[in-house]
Image: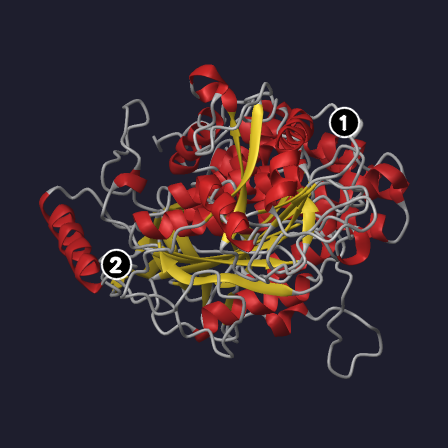
């Protein structure tokens, strides 16, 4: 009898156990796969029963000596339940005998057949529960692929009249790369130290540096940071002093190879060029139970977009967290093989458990800190859709409060770009994490725009042209002193005598702009017709050559000092930036007021600021930034209409706006309707290109959503 059973398995071309009920099952499910399983098993019941050694008990028949390596496809009313009686993929009860096929893996865990076939169809062979590596996986194939309704992998030529065949397929042994540092990409255990990152492609990097140097020398395609200054007024009477005289310092990063400064010319995306700095990217992804279904599917698609747009010198590591956190794979170069492995790992994700943001962040930071090799640019992307159900208590703190700062890398500057997904995420914590690390906070209100949000973020990371940028300001006239430097969240310093100051402007993406407002005291001067107020110098590190670059000549700010002056005209550039800073301050104050429970006062603050902006010179001239700020203040006011609206979306919307203005960097916000076009004031051309690509490129079947062309504000008018 045993010999016959082995022959039957050989005839089927697989190592499979099939449990067949004695009585016919009622087709209680409309699923075509469930119906076909019933048909297949009924046609084979007599042969399978006669060939398999069984001991009859109850309503089912099963092998007397099942081996640990066998897999079961069960359609039986009396089949044993999986652990806890639930499918670990869809988190619903496993109920055999009601038209649902149940797959039992060789590790003894059970799942609904349609759930596990979807889980493994991209090559995943890891148990979602215990992370055991399977030798056999379920397989589902449309019968209509071949003539006469025959399946592609049906060696036994089973007769059938349904649309689907469900079988269990043995997985061939993978061909391992002998140069890999670990035995398996999906190894269930993790080392104590994450120093197993893949070695950088030094030869490729050297080639890139040479290409960059040649391009920069021959074509001058990548220039230096541009520095421009704008005094509030071009002239002040000699006999007049003025306190808090504003001077705008404007920086613009150079464009990358393959792109010109002409905005009317079709350009090539810099992401296809070799002359850019490679990145180390760690994505920390929430896979808690609330992410199940559409959210997880959209997250996988968004990660697929990210993976496909990383280059062979870029490295990626993925951390998945729910109640605990695990590293799916170490930092790996995104070669063709690396991309395929990363896609398989991401597609294997399932959603269940709680939300331990702290543990996910800790493990993501550990990948960055422990790495043996370092690409010039490093960053962490954090996404969560829920409240942190675990806490990290501050040392000596009287309250149980999450201390995320202690979890971030202490040494290198590694920004965490946080994405709050949906209405239930912890916007305050996510914003705090991004603010502490120097990253941005984005609010993804509509599920369908997550890929666009990721696209905008990585477009910036893949186009870093300057690092550690520092603006130095020095007063040149004896009695001129610095009153203040307004730079948002960028760190500033002013000497005790208020004669010099500096701004740490951080990393700059290609063609990204920064505006800083410096106020000084201008004294009376009867000695000359012209006064020099400041000298502005900018230094930064080239991310490819790793050398510090200093502009040859400092930018000097001068004003005229005539005896008599007619009507003075305020600089439009200074006025519009003052409006931006004024609006950001009003947003921060309104948010603090709302958190104290006074939404009425918060709304009043926003409306007062909006009215004040409408009276300014730039607003009256129809400046588009001022128009956008007014619309933004109006949107925030509406999202503070009542406590319910504020809790569900208002807080996150305001915080993402504050993050965008404080860092002068584009963030995703809201539901991607026209009201969010205002945040594109900080969107670079590279970001615009990437968002457009995301909106026109899909992996698999995209969800139904309205596609919106990314908008950006017109170029800064050239000084006359």
Which residue is tagged 2?
A: 544
Picture residue at 52% right of the left edge, 28% below the top: 158
Q: Position of residue 162 (x, y in %)?
A: 60, 20
Location of residue 670 with respect to 288 vertically, above or below = above
| Residue at 80%, 38% in the rendered image | 97
Nearest the eye: 578 or 482: 578
**Residue 371 image offset from top left, x and y in percent:** 41, 72
Nearer to the camera, 254 or 166: 166
Q: Is residue 332 visible?
A: yes
The image quarter containing residue 387 is bottom right
What is the image's colouring?
Answer: secondary structure
How many residues crowd around disc 2 within 10 Å: few (fewer than 14), some, or many (20 or more)? Answer: many
Residue under label 1: 29
Name the residue furthest left.
218
Work out which quarter of the rendered image holds the C terminus and state it: top left
Q: Is 156 or 316 nearer to us in this picture?
A: 156
Q: CA separation, marks 1 and 2? A: 59 Å
């Amino acid at each position: 009898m045993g010999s016959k059973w082995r022959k039957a398995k050989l005839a089927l071309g697989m190592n499979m156990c099939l449990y067949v009920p004695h009585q016919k099952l009622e087709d209680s499910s409309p699923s075509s796969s469930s119906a076909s399983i019933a048909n297949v098993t009924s046609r084979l019941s007599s042969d399978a029963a006669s060939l398999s050694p069984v001991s009859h008990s109850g309503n089912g028949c099963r092998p007397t000596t099942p081996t640990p390596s066998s897999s079961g496809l069960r359609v039986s009313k009396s089949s044993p339940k999986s652990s806890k009686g639930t499918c670990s993929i869809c988190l619903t009860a496993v109920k055999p005998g009601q038209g649902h096929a149940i797959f039992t893996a060789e590790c003894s865990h059970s799942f609904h057949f349609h759930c596990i076939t979807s889980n493994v169809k991209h090559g995943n062979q890891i148990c979602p529960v215990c992370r055991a590596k399977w030798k056999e996986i379920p397989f589902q194939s449309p019968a209509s692929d071949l003539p006469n309704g025959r399946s592609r992998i049906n060696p036994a030529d089973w007769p059938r009249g349904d649309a689907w065949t469900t079988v269990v397929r043995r997985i061939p042994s993978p061909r391992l790369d002998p140069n890999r540092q670990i035995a398996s990409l999906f190894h269930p255990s993790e080392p104590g130290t994450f120093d197993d990152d893949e070695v950088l492609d030094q030869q490729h990097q050297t080639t890139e540096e040479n290409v960059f140097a040649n391009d920069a020398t021959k074509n001058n395609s990548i220039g230096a940071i541009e520095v421009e200054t704008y005094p509030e007024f071009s002239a002040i009477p000699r006999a007049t002093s003025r306190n808090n005289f504003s001077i705008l310092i404007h920086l613009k990063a150079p464009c990358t190879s393959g792109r010109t400064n002409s905005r009317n010319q079709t350009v090539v995306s810099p992401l296809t060029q070799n002359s850019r700095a490679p990145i180390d990217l760690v994505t920390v992804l929430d896979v808690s139970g609330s992410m199940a279904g559409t959210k997880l599917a959209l997250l996988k698609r968004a990660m697929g977009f990210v993976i496909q747009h990383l280059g062979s010198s870029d490295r990626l590591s993925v951390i998945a967290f729910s109640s605990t956190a695990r590293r799916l794979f170490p930092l790996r170069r995104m070669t063709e093989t690396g991309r395929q492995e990363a896609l398989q790992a991401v597609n294997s994700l399932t959603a269940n458990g709680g939300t331990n943001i702290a543990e996910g962040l800790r493990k993501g930071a550990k990948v960055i800190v422990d790495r043996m090799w370092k690409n010039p640019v490093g960053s962490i992307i954090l996404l969560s859709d829920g409240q942190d159900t675990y806490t990290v208590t501050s040392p000596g703190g009287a309250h149980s409060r999450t201390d995320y700062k202690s979890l971030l890398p202490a040494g290198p500057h590694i920004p965490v770009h946080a994405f709050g997904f949906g209405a239930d995420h912890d916007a305050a914590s996510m914003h705090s994490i991004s603010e502490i690390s120097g990253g941005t906070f984005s609010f993804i209100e509509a599920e369908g725009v997550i890929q666009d949000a990721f696209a905008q973020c990585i477009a910036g990371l893949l186009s870093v042209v300057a690092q550690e940028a520092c603006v130095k300001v020095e007063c040149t006239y004896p009695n001129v002193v610095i009153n203040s430097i307004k730079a948002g969240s960028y760190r500033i310093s002013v000497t005790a005598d208020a004669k010099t100051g500096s701004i740490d402007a951080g990393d700059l993406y290609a063609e990204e702009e920064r505006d800083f407002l410096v106020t000084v005291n201008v004294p009376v001067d009867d000695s000359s017709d012209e006064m020099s107020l400041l000298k502005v110098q900018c230094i930064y590190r080239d991310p490819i050559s790793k050398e510090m670059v200093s502009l040859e000549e400092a930018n000097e700010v001068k004003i005229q000092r005539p005896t008599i002056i007619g009507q003075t005209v305020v600089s439009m550039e200074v006025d519009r930036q003052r409006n931006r800073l004024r609006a950001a301050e009003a947003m921060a104050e309104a948010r603090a007021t709302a958190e104290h429970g006074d939404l009425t006062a918060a709304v009043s603050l926003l409306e007062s600021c909006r009215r004040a902006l409408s009276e300014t010179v730039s607003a009256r001239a129809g400046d588009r930034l001022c128009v956008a700020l007014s619309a933004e203040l109006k949107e925030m006011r509406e999202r503070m209409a009542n406590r319910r609206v504020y809790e569900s979306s208002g807080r996150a919307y305001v915080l993402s706006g504050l993050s965008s203005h404080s860092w002068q960097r584009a963030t995703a916000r809201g539901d991607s309707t026209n009201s969010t076009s205002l945040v594109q004031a900080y969107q670079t051309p590279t970001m615009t290109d990437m968002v457009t690509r995301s909106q026109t490129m899909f992996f698999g079947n995209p969800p139904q959503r309205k596609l919106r062309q990314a908008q950006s504000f017109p170029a800064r008018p050239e000084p006359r």
